[in-house]
Image (cartoon, grey):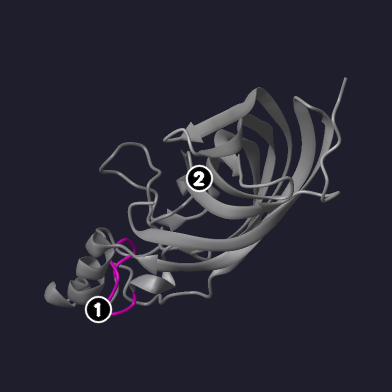
């Protein structure tokens, strides 16, 4: 996200159907914080422009958080394919079991975006002086989720997991008017037509616990 970074805390529950295939669900929630460029926009605002009290695309000073999109939670249901499974040695002394896997499934995200705003009936130009920020609106977005990762097992039941995930869906991250007859002739509205497709990439680091505590050996 260009304007906001998100940190999610969550957990995943999986069942291994075969040595090479597992099915599971993930759920997590968290918080976001502004990026450096968003901080600069927030500190300047439209206050620097003479005779403009409100602007549809540019916030008043200190009000940027009232329009930036937020990722509040995410739930996924997915299959895990494990094409590589074996052991790795560190300096010929420490041996660990390693899984290299690929995830594929569907993701559901809880978003908070700028509420619908209509300035189309007001004066020409970018200003919308009789309007103000509306309450942020919550909605659910659905999209595919895919990625891969590595799990290193230190014994039969505990390991360390590093994973990359992408869950593409459409949303309005900046909370700005992006739709119109051209790039300069916008419709002066904030609504679903201003949503764009983003990859929504995420890196995860976590602990893995396997049950039963003693691994069963397959033929």
Specify the principal SS of the magenta part. Answer: loop
Expressed as whole percent of the image width and height from the top left, the position of residue 92 reads: 46, 33
The structure residue drawn at horizontal position 65% and vertical position 33%, both measured from the top left corner, is 103
Expressed as whole percent of the image width and height from the top left, the position of residue 209 reads: 72, 53
Expressed as whole percent of the image width and height from the top left, the position of residue 29 reads: 61, 64
Q: Quadrant of the C terminus?
A: top right
Q: Secondary structure at mark 1?
A: loop
The structure residue drawn at horizontal position 40% and vertical position 44%, both measured from the top left corner, is 179
The residue pinned by badge 2 equals 193
Residue 60, magenta (yes or no):
yes
Residue 20 drawn above or below residue 5: above
Q: Nearer the viewer, residue 53 or 213?
A: 213
Quarter occupied by residue 36: bottom left
Q: Secondary structure at mark 2?
A: helix
Label 2 Cα crowd, 10 Å radius (few <14 / some 14-19 / many 20+): some
Residue 71 visible in the current orientation: no
Q: Marks 2 and 1: which is nearer the front?
A: 1
Q: Which mark is residue 61?
A: 1
Q: Which mark is residue 201?
A: none
Mark 2–mark 1 contact, CB under 8 Å?
A: no
Q: Nearer the viewer, residue 157 or 164?
A: 157
Q: Which residues are magenta?
A: 55-63
The structure residue drawn at horizontal position 39% and vertical position 49%, both measured from the top left corner, is 187
Real-space CA distance between mark 2 and mark 1, rounded to the nearest whole angstrom? 26 Å
Q: Nearer the viewer, residue 8 or 109?
A: 8
Residue 214 drawn above or below residue 115: above
Quarter occupied by residue 65: bottom left
The structure residue drawn at horizontal position 30% and vertical position 44%, both measured from the top left corner, is 185
Quarter occupied by residue 218: top right
């Amino acid at each position: 996200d260009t304007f906001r970074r998100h940190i999610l805390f969550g957990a995943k529950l999986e069942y291994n159907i075969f040595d090479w295939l597992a099915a599971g669900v993930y759920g997590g929630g968290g918080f976001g914080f502004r990026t450096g460029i968003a901080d600069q926009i927030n500190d300047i605002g439209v206050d620097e422009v003479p005779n403009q009290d409100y602007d549809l695309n540019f916030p008043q000073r200190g009000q940027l958080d009232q329009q930036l999109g937020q990722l509040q939670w995410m739930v996924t249901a997915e299959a895990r394919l494990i094409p590589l499974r074996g052991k790795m040695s560190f300096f010929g002394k420490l041996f660990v079991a390693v899984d290299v896997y690929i995830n594929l499934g569907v993701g559901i995200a809880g978003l908070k975006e700028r509420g619908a705003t209509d300035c189309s009936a007001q004066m020409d130009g970018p200003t919308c002086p009789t309007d103000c920020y509306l309450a942020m609106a919550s909605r659910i977005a659905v999209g595919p989720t895919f990625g891969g990762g590595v799990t290193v097992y230190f014994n039969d039941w505990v390991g360390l997991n590093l994973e990359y995930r992408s869950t593409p869906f459409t949303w309005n991250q900046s909370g700005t008017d992006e739709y119109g007859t051209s790039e300069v002739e916008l419709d002066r509205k904030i609504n679903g037509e201003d949503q764009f497709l983003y990859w929504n990439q995420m890196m995860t680091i976590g602990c893995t616990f396997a049950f039963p505590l003693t691994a069963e050996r397959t033929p």
